[in-house]
Image (spheres, coloured by chain):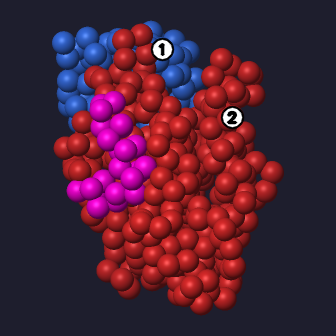
Chain colours: A blue, B red
Amino acid sequence: MSVYAVNKVCRRLVHEPELRAALAASPQSAEAALRAAHPPLSEDEVRQLLAGDVGALSQAGCNHFLMSQLGRFELFGLDLREEAARVRAAHR
Amino acid sequence: MRAPGRRGEGSSVGPRCLAVGCKNCYSLCINGSDHIVGGFGVPHTPHYPAMVASGAPDAQEISALYGQVSRRLRATAPDVIVFYTADHYNVFFEECIPIFSVGVADSAVGASDYDTVPRRELPIDSELARGLQRHLVRAGFDVGMSQEFAFDHTIVAPMHFLSRETDIPLVPIFVNALIPPLPSAQRCRALGEAVRDGLAQLAGPRRVAVVTSGSFSFEVGGLRTTEGSHVGVPDPAWMDRVLDLLAAGDLDTLVAESTEEQLAAAGNAGGENLLWIAMLATIGGGAPDWLEAQRRFGHGYGAWVDAA
């Protein structure tokens, strides 16, 4: 679990509309885009991102502010409220 | 209104500029500074410009609060604004984070991160910015120099409300208030004092306003968000404490109590309190002329202007 790689993908969402489009287009497109990320995401990180499992990513230490961008751009079944709800639930 | 302080007899404020022989400004200097005409603090919520434009339920309140600050800022007729900002992972990211940096480009566009903030190009007083950066390094601060960047919402959203029609040149000073380890409150105060010293040497005839944006207690997307929301105010008691200390003009206690642990408890944006400390140190402290809170959002709006 690199954490930094996840944070970087989340940060890139804000500035790279083509990445947002790739992640939103289809599960296949999303997985390909995540596997092309640099530095590389771990297998767990790819799986957790595709599943919108921000709770697990939170427990691993990923940045909450940056992960909220996943909700902002409604990726992986998340929206802003759902992203925060999953993070809260993971720490109860 | 939250028991606003007022400069005057009995305060710890220094002599008025006329009393110390100011030759550059005659009615709006504060704390004995020849050049600094006021300090201002506001929030930077990126959704506010769109909310106001669309007449959202909070629009009137948001407009009124920013309007109170904007009116006071305009009254000081600044030639330049020193703006303390906490870049939100946009100019700087985890691959390389300066604790402090001064933006020295000729201008920058923004907001780079939200299209809810009307895009504009804001001029930068590059000469003063470069001079301040050199001054700070010589004064012992390892301050970066940013020559190419875009502004994010932390500057452009406030400027949308504070100076929509007039492009007042900025000197942006980036403070790492989000990505731990943060600078200490003592260090941010010292930075503000060094900027004040630098302005005394470098500002010339410029009238300088000092502005910052940030919250006192705020969490985005994390554990301490409010049920049903993606944001929260994790430590409202701390927010009230900050407001009380600001109203009293008690910068010493604010600095002492803004510990690493306290700022972390205030939320993942709790470090933005450091920006207010730097702003206050730059203007020489003192009680505000006007201060009001938006408690449900962890926000404060304040103006420190010693108008004649």
Q: Which residue is at a point 25% across and 40% down the rendered structure image?
A: B264
Quarter of the picture holding the C terminus of chain A? top left
Q: Which residue is mark 1?
A: A79
Q: Which residue is at a point 37% across and 44% down the rendered structure image?
A: B244
Question: Where in the figure is residue A21, as x and y percent of width and height?
Answer: 58, 23
Q: Which residue is mark 2?
A: B63
Same chain for the residues at labels 2 and 1, yes or no? no
Q: Is residue B178 left or right of residue A44?
A: right
The one nearer the camera, B306 or B274, is B306
Magenta region: B235-256
The one nearer the camera, B133 or A13, is B133
Residue B158 within the segment the image draws in magenta = no
Q: Examine the image and state in which quarter residue A88 appears.
A: top left
Q: Which residue is at a point 48% across and 52% down the rendered structure image?
A: B5
Secondary structure mostly taken by the magenta-highlighted segment of the chain: helix
- Label 1 neighbourhood size at 10 Å, few (<14), some (14-19), many (20+)? some
Residue B286 seen: yes
Q: Which residue is at a point 49% across and 36% down the rendered structure image?
A: B293
